[in-house]
Amino acid sequence: MAGRSPRETVKAEGGAKVHVEELSFYQGDTKVTGKVFRPVQDSSARLSAVIYCQSREYGESWCRALAGKGIIGYCFDFSGDTAAARAETLRTVLGGMREQRHVAKDRIFVMGEGLGCLPAAELAVDKPKQVRGLILVSPGFNPLEISRKARRYRHSVLVVDDSLGRAANVEEVVGFILQ
């Protein structure tokens, strides 16, 4: 079950209009709250979506920029501080996003940044039929070596490590998603 707040319209970089609203999903008694950024568009179209894993604070700029390029972005705060709690929260968010009427269920990507990379990578290898691709920004680990399951992940992976002088940018991420 999901809960919504009133929608507002803002501008993304380049002037594109973007709808922004609070969107919450329930994980048992726990409410997972985040923001969804969606391009202003034909209401019947289903678009690619990115679930941003790190924190809502860091994800808002990424999600707004992606929505300005025609991709739905959702950022949220993890509930709980254990790996198991984060994994469960992320599975809840993935399930909730798959139910959104504007989201193309076969075009959902997970984007992790920093500490959000490990839960993003684990979700992608655990749910390969539901996660179209994985985007990792400054992961601090080799995502394809986290487990034997990771070697079986057959979808696309984009890894950008800012510490190596290759900064992540919206155009590269959008190109990866639209390929």
Image (cartoon, rainbow, N blue to C red):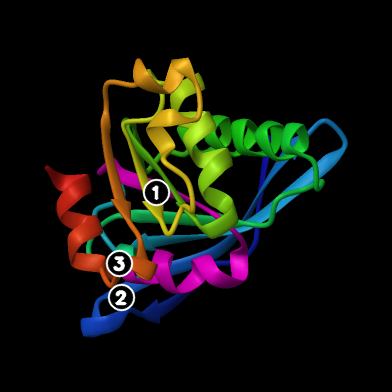
Q: Is residue 77 above or below residue 13?
A: above
Of the residues shown, which amino acid type is indicated by label 2? Lys
Q: Earlier in the sequence, mark 3 or mark 1?
A: 1
**Residue sitting farthest toward the right:** 29
Asked if residue 51 lies in the magenta stretch, the reply is yes
Residue 71 in the image: above or below residue 87: below
Quadrant location of residue 131? top left
Q: Which residue was labeled with disc 2?
A: 17
Viewer-proximal residue, 18 or 93? 93
The x, y position of residue 130, in whole percent, is: 41, 24
- Quadrant position of residue 133: top left
Image quadrant where one finds the C terminus: top left
The residue positioned 48% from the left and 36% from the top of the image is 121
Classify mark 1: helix, strand or loop: strand
Q: Amino acid at mark 1?
A: Val
Image quadrant where one finds the N terminus: top right
Q: On residue 167, which mark appears?
A: none
CA gap between label 1 and label 2 equals 18 Å
Q: Amino acid at mark 3?
A: Ala
Which residues are the magenta region?
A: 44-65
Residue at 47% from the left image edge and 39% from the top image edge? 100
Residue visible at 49% across and 53% down in the picture: 140
Q: Residue 49 at x, y = what percent?
A: 36, 46
Residue 50 bears which disc, if any? Answer: 1
x 42%, y 23%: residue: 150
Task: Residue 8 in the image: state x and y as whole percent.
Answer: 50, 74
